[in-house]
Image (tube, rainbow, N blue to C red):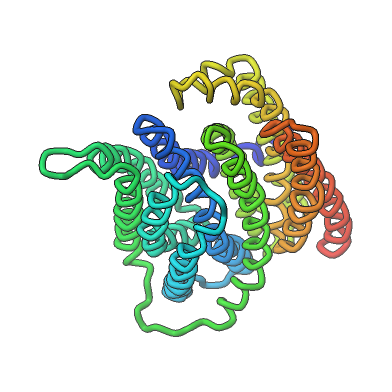
Amino acid sequence: MADLKKYFSGILTLSIPLIVGNIAHMLIGAVDVLVASRHGTDTLAAISISNAILVSLFIIGIGLMAGITPVVSNYLGEGQQSKKYLLSTINYAMLLAAIFMVIGIGIIPFLDKFGFEDALLPIMKQYIFIVSFSNFGGYLHFSLKEFLQAYEITVFPNVLQVLSIFLNLIFNIIFVFGFWKIPAMGAIGLAVATLLVRTLIGLVLFIYCYKFVDYKFKFEKSYIGQLIKVGYPIAFAMMFEFLGFNVITILTGRISSLYAAAQSILITITSLIYMVPLAVSNAIAIKVGYANGAKNYSDIKNYSFAGSAISFLFMFAAAFILYAFPKFILGIFTPDEKLIEIGTSIIALAALYQVLDGLQVSFSGVLKGLKRTLFVTGAIVLGYWFIGLPIGALFAYKYGMGLFGFWVGIALAILTMCIFMGAAIVCIFKRLRKEYS
């Protein structure tokens, strides 16, 4: 029991600052939703659909950088010196930022062909153009945060993330509603605030990391190769997962802007809760990655169990709260009775989904730490694109269940992912037990 407590304590100690940072990251988005809903339903719908498109692109780059922590932690477990890779990490992040900025701007001329409401299109085009430039600050911050996590340096990057909530709120109020000589910009003000906040926190974290950087630049090909090898399955996994959610937002937006707004609020609530097991998953990846580099099967197994148990218990408690107080929770994000009514009809199902989501993200953390990320991609593709979206669309359109039908599909997708990744982990552990013993 004493040994097991050590593993639970190790995961929790590493997770707490990551949880704070992840929740702070989501609260930045929640502030956008909150301010947008106060400005108007069209504003909320426009930024919800725009972010559905932007996040699906942004997340591919994030996924390609998500290999940084497991790769560096494995190097550290092997006893390698890894700080020399920081400058290569930064350059890699900036290249990805430029690529996805160009793609984001390139989508704008095609928005007219998607059948969105005419009132939303001008807002969406301007919003997407401005936010695309925020990739540089956003990717710089994420890449440095991932690098520092491998060294278990987590406090400053996540405190910075918390401070950015307040900065984002201030900028949103100033640019959306106007202040002194600054005119009210509406939805465009939300885009300007996002650009400024991402740029500032990226630059501040770069200054913090200055002491780690070896400015005798050498492009570490083997390191970048490892990032791509580990990262591209994560990128595709994250893209397919977020795209699955955001395709639902886009499809519901074509039915009604109210559905798109309700979906945005539900995703904001569930995503805020999800930040806790996501942080635990990152901690699992770090601890398992270090143990895998050291070929320590006992630590791999015990950290995996401890992290998964923590995630499951937290999500079970969160699901109960969602089920018990749906109107109160929804009312925090919108005063619109119609949106609350739509959300209330779905939130019980969302509560069940949360419990399963805690397990699947923990399993993905184990697989990332072991650098077996193709299994994560396979689980997400199978779950969302072969099970969740087809069944959700069938229920939504053929059986007239609307947004509720899509959420049935989401729940089935997560269940499929849990089964697939759980089976993969059992098989891998059997092989590692023989290999590392």
Horizontally, residue 29 falls left or right of residue 312, namely left
Above or below for 23 versus 118: above
Task: Return the x and y of residue 388 as percentages of the image width and height.
Answer: 77, 45
Q: Residue at x 60, y 24 (%)?
A: 342
Task: Return the x and y of residue 75 as percentages of the image width and height.
Answer: 60, 68
Of residues 284 and 183, the one nearer the viewer is 183
Look at the image and tell me whether residue 3 can be seen. no
Of residues 316 and 119, the one nearer the viewer is 119
Of residues 83 and 382, the one nearer the viewer is 382
Task: Return the x and y of residue 186 as percentages of the image width and height.
Answer: 30, 42
Above or below for 201 versus 183: below
Point out the image quarter for the N terminus: top right
Task: Return the x and y of residue 130 as percentages of the image width and height.
Answer: 35, 58
Residue occupying the far left of the picture: 181
- Asked which quadrant contains residue 141, the reply is bottom left
Of residues 305 and 399, the one nearer the viewer is 399
Q: Residue at x 75, y 56 (%)?
A: 381
Q: Residue at x 57, y 44 (%)?
A: 279
Q: Residue at x 43, y 72 (%)?
A: 98
